[in-house]
Image: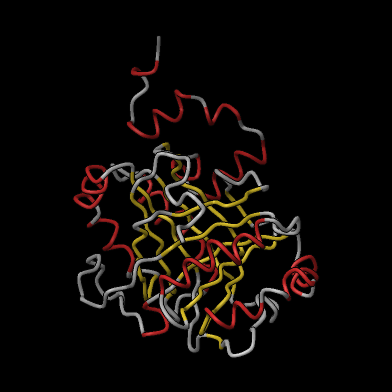
Amino acid sequence: MPIIFSFKGNDMIEINSYTTVKRRERVPHEIFATYWRDVHGPLCSRLPGLGLYIQHHFSRNQDAHLWPLADGVEEITDYELDGGVEIGFASAEDQKQFQNASSILFSDEQNMFEETLAYDLPDGSATVVNRLNDETFNGTDRSDRIHVHFSPRTSLAQLQQYLANDLGDVLAGAEEVLKLRLHLCQPFNNDGMHPPAPNVAHYANPARAELVIMEIAFESPLARRRFFESPVFQATLAGQSEHIAQLKAFAVSGLYTYVRDGKITTAGLRGSRAAELIEYLGAANQRTPEVEHLLLTGALDAVRT
């Protein structure tokens, strides 16, 4: 049965990936999050060829009911993350251009990342429903958003079909679900052929080698808990038991968009917190073509008429 959703989406992105990140334990979370947002983020955003770049920051301190475990489904053990990254390119040529320039980016990862795992998405990602208008969002997440990592009971292909066609259809049709996005990951290959980030681990144990990742958002934790208790969701538990062996849910604390459809955002250009200040004060002058061109190139004359 073919997947009913279009996993190439409606934007320009043809090649994309989802990368999990874990911070260095000796780096305080606030320092990690700020450095990732305001130092590493703008560096990545300015590299040539990039078509999509979104940081999802996770909170390890959240309620204990992010996603219920159906009968026979276990939580993935010893699995803690501090974020997830969406990276995308419009073409293989753009990806190659980015890769050729990325050594300065990967050399920075050791400052805050202990581990990163980049999962290729050969079929792309699908935004099944989105009522949040968060395409270029930058800031603390105002919704109750979680990322759920599912590991298959039988095969990855069957799990992908189930989440895309069966469970995904139920979730997308529920008014409590404000956003549903699916990432159909290719199995992670522990072959050592990973981005050359010194002193950063790139190894997936069996439970993490094959994953489907779901981004799902509700209005509030209470709305989420009530939906999980509803007959609509309870009716999905048998199917979850059949197709899911293990899972782990992560609470999203912030969403930061640096590049969308090949265009750098204010967060990508100036840093996330600077972009928040510009938005808060309504500093429209900071977003004029003259100012943005100056910051990108160091010159003003090219935008004058």
Q: Nearer the viewer, residue 142 or 163?
A: 163
Would you identify the image quadrant in which residue 124 lies?
bottom left
Q: Is residue 31 above or below residue 55?
A: below
Q: Nearer the viewer, residue 253 or 182?
A: 182
Q: Residue at x 63, y 56 (%)?
A: 140
Q: Is residue 118 above or below residue 275?
A: below
Q: Residue at x 79, y 72 (%)?
A: 231
Q: Position of residue 98 (x, y in %)?
A: 26, 48
Q: Is residue 289 above or below residue 72?
A: above
Q: Position of residue 53 (x, y in %)?
A: 42, 50
Q: Position of residue 204 (x, y in %)?
A: 35, 80
Would you identify the image quadrant in which residue 30 lies?
bottom right
Q: Is residue 17 above or below residue 229?
A: above
Which quadrant, please, contains the C terminus?
A: top left
Residue found at the far front of this picture:
1
Q: How is the image coloured?
A: secondary structure
Q: Residue at x 33, y 42 (%)?
A: 90
Q: Is residue 135 left or right of residue 119?
A: right
